[in-house]
Image (cartoon, coloured by chain):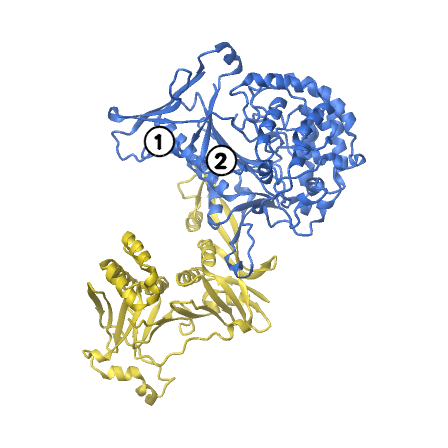
Chain colours: A blue, B yellow
Amino acid sequence: MTSLSFSLLPGSLLRLHEALVCLAKFSDTVSIEAEPEFLRLSALNSSKTAYSAFAFDSYAFFENYDLSADRNAGRSRSRGEKFSCQVYLKALLSVFKGRTGGRDKDTAVERCEFEVHEGLDETECRLVIKMICGLGVIRSYKLTYESTAIQHAIFDRSTAINEWSIEPKFLKEITDHFSPSAEQLDIYSENTKVIFTSFTAKITHGKEVLKQPVHTSVAIDKADFEQFMANDGVHVAISLKDFRAVIAHAETARIMITALYTRPCRPLQLAYDFEGIRTEFTLMTTGDPGPEDVPTSSRPVPQLSARQTPAPAPTSQASNSANSASSRQMPPPRVRPIRPLTGTASRPEPVEPSTQATAPPTSSLKFDSLFVPADDDRQWDVAEDDEAEAEAEDMLGWDASADLDNPDSLGPRLRDSEPSFGNQMDISHQDAMGIPPTQRMSQVCQRHVAGSSPLTHCSFMGLDFLTEDRFDQLPHLDLRAKGMRHTNPIKTQDPKTQLVAQPAPTPTASNPVSGRGTGPHTPLILPCASIPGPQFPCSPQPKATTLRSSNRARTCSLPTATCFTPCK
Amino acid sequence: MRFRTEVVNTATFTKLIASLSSLSKLCWMRLESNTIRFTIIPDQGTQVWAQLPVESIFEETDYTLESNTGVINLEVPLPSLHRALRSAAAAKWVQLRLTQKAKVPLLALTIRAKSRVKQGNSLGTTSTVNDAQGEAFGAAPGDGEEGAGLLNTARERETFITQEIPVKVLHESAVEGLHEPRCRDPDVHIVLPDLFQLKSISERFTKLAADSSPKAAAAAATMTSSNNLMDQPLDAVSSSGSGTRPSGVSPKLELSANMHGSLRLSIATDALKISSVWSDLVNPALDPSQLSQTQIEQLPSERMRALGGDDEAGWAKVRIDGRDWARVLSVGRMNPKVVACFIHETALVLYVYLPGSFNEDESCLTYYINSYLT
């Protein structure tokens, strides 16, 4: 049993409160994870389109932080102690009620102690919070908690090709112009301007026309940004409510917000670090579902790639990247310099088509958007190989930090899957997902690369499957519809090169259509096999083999840092 | 059909729309070559017929209006327009134009706002000053307390805001049947006192009447209209909580005036009877150029004038809804001159003349308020 206790001074307590207030805008419950280095609070909204996480550094933020394993010390030491649970946010917030008032100076909180009572000998497992106030007043709260597998959104920063940083007050200024009822926010840049547009995808008829929400767009100079490295014409749309929640919190911290994203229908991450707190908000972006919902088309595969890259381009790109990946293993050129791997040692893997394919073509109304003309012909373009790879970059996946309750169970899984490179695994995987074995070899191989210890939240292969298993119980539709993928990308160095190579050129192509919001929230992709083999610019097989070996070799050396834990 | 103009008098426009939007959600906006008309015809309550010369809010030289009939009739959602205009508060340049997106006609309001940003070396010192301050600051470079280096990094930010308000284009046939109410000549015309004062007193009276005896009021409501029978339990519930009642049984203010400069505002319930009287107000003279002397002499207002100031018969009286009246008086934010025309026991017509450099005769808001019987 792990025991956790920590204490906070008033300043930190205020920050904690602010974080909880912010989290409350995303979900009813907060997930608490304690690790030796940090305490993380995270929340995933019910539609699974927005994830927010605050990681508080155990040394810098807390006055006192103690996480220890009473038993099995040896094992835990090596694996890292860990405690996680979920708490109802309203209950937790009520603890702070009246605390911030400062009306009673005498009985102001001087110290706050959190303690988890968990153990076999405990009659009640509770999260105990003690507010030690002046004049010897102590307020104690006992909250129930729930042990659950905690899901994290996965965001690979290193593949994000668009990045900007700005002070939150500018963003606040922008959102102030928006109607309170506006639901979505589209962001794109054009020449020297960055344009934020609020809109609500709502169908109205006749008289209702006048009740349609006002569309507001605000254009600000790129110079207002601390840095702006995003491709022009790339529209990403996120929920305005989430965006406001982030800004509101960032304003309290007065810290520069950094946004990272690749392209529509991929997650966008807003992040900032301050005072020993690392915050990350991963928001699913929508692109534009044109009038004809792409998922319903028989060959949706091309959609994303077609939008992202002009039709002729992908072939060469794909093969180039494949070459570079397989033969040279050199990082291909990027549009912008490779950023330091901010905590992300590995990257998602282009395997997703199979899982995507399982998702029925649902798209929620909410994501209807305005930015793609009805006559977007390009989505009918032929699928290109790079589609699959491009597909995989920085998708929002899940990382059920699976080692909580039964870490050992994971080991075997991992090892089981490792030997089964190639088709075998592929099939098994796809069986699980209930679709025909139509995955490409290259993808499969890459997928098997990373056997990592569950300790790292990295969604390496074992975890990958584990989460998928878990997710089988969840309504697939739901996840799909909201555009989140629950598959965990696997990261290897090789795929990195591929992945990076492809996304980079595509947005710069500045295809008028490509920039627009793309299609339904989730790219619903048919199995690759639906595309005749020859269409792939590079033969999957050779690539697969080369990759496999390299990948495997690399596996051991991959840092097991919690690359995919958003806050680490 | 084209309409495009620059809004030069944003403040007036915003205030006008704000005043109108308190009365109704929808407004008929009629754009003509020289004038703009705003008309509100709610199902119940006060009608507003406003007419402004183009130059009072728009840039005359940049006023483009093209249409088969020479006019454009729009149905505009006032709250949206009002909200959109609030973005223009500190704007340098505002343009209004009619456009369409996906077959939905829109009034697009494009706003260019400027502000000055000082960019210090560290993030913490970065700050924005608003435009006015920014200019003042910029006007005196070098002698400020700021270092020259800091001034050099000061930068003008420019923000473009586009607000797209969905509107409905009305065909001429849809509006040709609409015309201003016709009333007989007023019995009394008088310039109203300061609207803010009038408004606060009116609201106070209304609140007192509403609070004084909900039961009596409910009983009164029963007598007034049998339709309200069903609502009574509801009324009781709502009034028990806040002391206010649904607008259906809102207290009626009694407003009366004579031709000797007096205005009386009163309210009476079973429990109380209060009134305020203003005196020494102006009864404006009618324009002799439009009416001959004999015509003027035959007007009811002249007959009322003939009666003495202390004669009760010389008072013209109307009964109006307290809440509606408060909404009407919200036009006071434009600081206008208001002439109230009383038609005894029939209606109250307010002529609201906007202040400003433009010709006051042409910019007039006319409010038609029906008098209640009880």
Q: Nearer the viewer, residue B317 or A464?
A: A464
Check the image and name the residue furthest to the left. B310
Which labelled disc corresponds to residue A256?
2
Q: Nearer the viewer, residue B117 or B234?
A: B234
Dot 2 and dot 1 residues touching (CB under 8 Å): no
Q: Is residue A309 above or below residue B59?
A: above
- In the rendered structure, which disc, 2 or 1, sits on the residue that comes first in sequence? 1
Q: Is residue A557 above or below residue B187?
A: above
Q: Position of residue A48 (x, y in %)?
A: 54, 36
Asked whether, in this view, residue A390 is left or right of residue A155, the answer is: right
Mark 1 residue crowding within 10 angstroms, few (<14) / some (14–19) / many (20+): some
The residue that label 1 is drawn on is A95
Give the amino acid type for the residue marked by disc 2 in the picture. Answer: Met
Residue shown at the point (37%, 85%) measured from the top left: B291
Residue B149 in sight here:
no
Asked whether, in this view, residue A521 is left or right of residue B177, the answer is: right
Q: Position of residue A227 (x, y in %)?
A: 56, 37
Q: Chain of mark 1?
A: A
Observer-side mark, 2 or 1, equals 1
Asked whether, in this view, residue A159 is left or right of residue A104, the answer is: right
Q: Position of residue B103 (x, y in %)?
A: 61, 59
Q: Secondary structure at mark 1?
A: loop
Q: Are marks 2 and 1 on the same chain?
A: yes
Distance, label 2 to label 1, CA atoms, is 29 Å
Residue shown at the point (27%, 55%) measured from the top left: B243
Quadrant of the snapshot with the N terminus of chain A: top left
